[in-house]
Image (tube, rainbow, N blue to C red):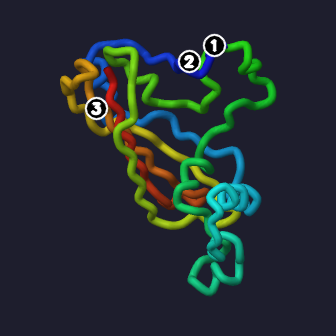
Amino acid sequence: MADGRESRTRLHQGTWAETESYLERPFPTTTGPDPVELGSIRRRLEVLEWDCPLHTDRAAAVRHGYGDVIAPATMLGTYAMPAYWQPGDPPLYQQQTAKLPPLYLENIPAPGERMSATDWSIHVYRYLEVNDRVSSTTRLVDINRKRTRLGDGAFLTIETVYTDHRGGPVGRTRLTVFRF
């Protein structure tokens, strides 16, 4: 069992040429198992001690032009994230890997056994409303090879596009990591 000082995520090893073969290739689309719902919004707001009626009061949200209560923008990925485990899956505690949903960056072959996040951005096209269901499609959009104090490596940028259950775009995120 990991003691918290090391990641159990295994990075797929390969060459930079193999990494480049992943440019613009979409990974499988994932869909969150649950719709946007008030309880999860409330739990997020409790942790932040955030009081905004757009996230709690349907009448207030409607008065401001929304169809229902909206989720905070930072919950976009939460609702698109696939389940960590589902009935019928083998127990996670028997595996020696992190208990995380798919991290597509770990599956992109590249030299180096480490990676560290360096940048993350979000662009919201439409706020999620209660009962929206969210899917996401991720692709590698940039590789920038660099030598740093950490070693030789590359900044890898993935872009994830989020859509609602009607197929309409609701947002986009970009994550850059340094793989070394």
The answer to whether 167 is drawn above or below residue 2 in the figure is below
Q: Earlier in the sequence, mark 2 or mark 3?
A: 2
The residue labelled by disc 1 is 96
Residue in the image at 68% along x and 65% along y: 130
Res 35 → quadrant: bottom right
Position in image of residue 135 (x %, y %): 56, 48
Q: Are marks 1 and 2 in contact (CB under 8 Å)?
A: yes
Which circle's residue, 1 or 2, is located before the other in the chain?
Answer: 2
Mark 3 neighbour class, 10 Å CA radius: few under 14, some 14 to 19, many 20 or more: many
Q: Quadrant of the N terminus?
A: top right
Q: Which mark is residue 169?
A: none
Q: Earlier in the sequence, mark 1 or mark 3?
A: 1
- In the displayed structure, 64 sits above or below 134; it is below
Q: Secondary structure at mark 1?
A: loop
Label 3 residue SS: strand
| Residue 95 drawn above or below residue 24 | above
Q: What distance separates the C-alpha of mark 1 from that of mark 2?
A: 7 Å
Toward the viewer: 114 or 162? Answer: 114
Residue linked to disc 3? 155
Outermost residue on the bottom side: it is 63
- Residue under pointer 2: 8
* Residue type of the residue flagged with mark 2: Arg
What's the distance in space between the residues labelled 1 and 3, CA to CA?
A: 27 Å
Q: CA distance from mark 2 to mark 3?
A: 21 Å
Category of crowding for the residue at label 2, using alpha-carbon neighbours closer than 10 angstroms: few (below 14), some (14–19), many (at least 20): some
Instruction: Please tell me which residue lies in front, 52 or 112.
Output: 52
Type of amino acid at the residue the image marks with label 1: Gln
User: Total label count?
Assistant: 3
Position of 168 compared to 94: left or right? left
Please report the residue visible at 45 percent of the width from the left and 62 percent of the height from the top: 124
Q: Amino acid at mark 3?
A: Phe
Q: Are marks 1 and 3 in contact (CB under 8 Å)?
A: no
